Image (cartoon, rainbow, N blue to C red):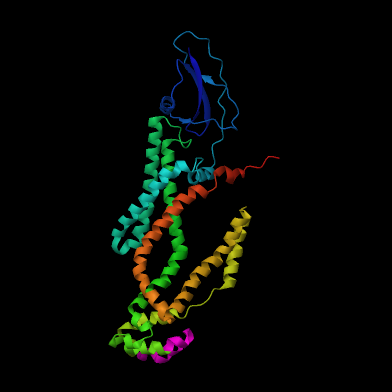
Amino acid sequence: MAVEFSYQVQNADGSTQTMGGRADRAPTWGELQDHVASTGAQLLPSTPAEQPPAQIATAAPPPEAAPAPAPSVGPSEVPAPSLGERAWNVVAPNRTFWSQLPSVGGAIGGAEVGAEIGTLGGPFAPVTIPAGAIIGATVGSGGMEAAQTALERRFGWQPAEAAPAGERVANAALRGGAFELLPLGVKTVTAAPILRSVIPTARAAEELAPVLAQAPERAPEAMQPLAGWWARNAPGGADHVIEAWKQLGDEGRQVLAGDWLPQMQQIVNATKAKGINWAHAATQGMLTGGSGFMHGLPTSGTAALAAAPAAVQAVVKAVPSMLRAGVLSPTGSQFLAALPRVGSYVAPAFNTATRIGAQVAAPFLWPKPQDIFEGPPQPPS
């Protein structure tokens, strides 16, 4: 006995159309997908709830005699999405978080491989490493989405997203590359200023560890004059060290420090750290918080934007203050001296952790397009 079936397709111009037909048996999802793809359209997993009903257009008649098909009406038309909606659908597609995990895993693995290849850049490594990570995340995310799409078609699974396969792969690749930029942005805004102040001082402390220990008798003979000068002046505090170093003059500093003059100058510079400029942070906070309020962000989001400048300054300024205290303390200076060795192990782990956090958290926490353009669902009245 012939059965009737219906399905919905999306045409190349973005419009949707409900189709139907009769056959000896209901076709499988894969058979329908192949048939619709041959016409240049895309088979949709379901009909949107807001789409007005349309009369099903009957396909070819069955082999046996059958009544003439009922006259069909024109297909229902859905307005094509705007450019902004398309952009948001790339970043936050209408699909579950779990269905994005394969592409997320591909982005993380691809970024790790790409960053490792970027280390071969030699003197250009500061550019080739992040570039390799972004390219790797893009390729890895898009590749895993292509594999997922192929498996859905092969086994007849319902697609994770109502979009053509090529569009899904391209969007996943863009997401992987874009979310790889997030940890790079964090490191540029916060970690880079910190590292610029910590690394030179830590390396100087490593080379001058016997001097900063404030035990001249245990320092190498060549360092004992400098170690004695530091042991006499460091207990007096940062201002005392700066004034004593200034009174030596250029020639006196060269005679005292010898080959360690650049490192000693770095240590003295570390004692000149200043505190937080609260007025500047408050002005920036009003600008960023006001911008969030004008764009309709919730109270928590507006407060976070307002507090961000002060938080960044606190982090950036707190580190030089800690360096100042560290170089003046025998114990703190030994901790600073160990940082270059510890950093060689911590830095790669930190990069991987921020990469995983960004790739996993972004699709889970990012708002859906319908929440942005239509607002969150309202509670029943």
Which residue is found at the position 43% from the left and 81% from the top?
Answer: 329
Query: Which of 363 and 38 lies nearest the eye of the viewer?
Result: 363
| Viewer can see residue 43 | yes
Q: Quadrant of residue 278?
A: bottom right
Is the magenta region chiefly helix, strand or loop?
Answer: helix
Where residue 49 sits, quadrant-wise, is: top right
In which quadrant of the rendered image does the C terminus lie? top right
Q: Residue 193's x, y, as percent?
A: 45, 68
* 246 up-or-down from 144: above or below: below
Most extreme residue toward the right is 381
Identify whether 120 is placed above or below 234: above
Figure check: 102 above or below 308: above
Whether residue 254 is visible to the viewer of this picture, yes or no, is no
Task: Name the spot of residue 91 as percent of width and height, x first.
Answer: 49, 46
Outermost residue toward the top? 65
Total tally of numbered discs in the picture? 0
Identify the residue at image location x=52%, y=66%: 312
Which residue is painted at 44% across and 62% down in the image?
187
Tell me if residue 243 is in the magenta stretch: yes
Comparing 319 with 138, the one in front is 319
Towards the viewer: 242 or 379: 379
The relative height of residue 220 versus residue 337 in the rendered view (above or below) is below
Magenta segment, which residues? Answer: 233-254
**Per the image, is 286 magenta?**
no
Residue for point 50% across, 72% down: 318
Residue 97 rendering spot, x and y as whole percentages: 48, 43
Q: Is residue 200 left or right of residue 239?
A: left
Q: Position of residue 186 (x, y in %)?
A: 46, 60
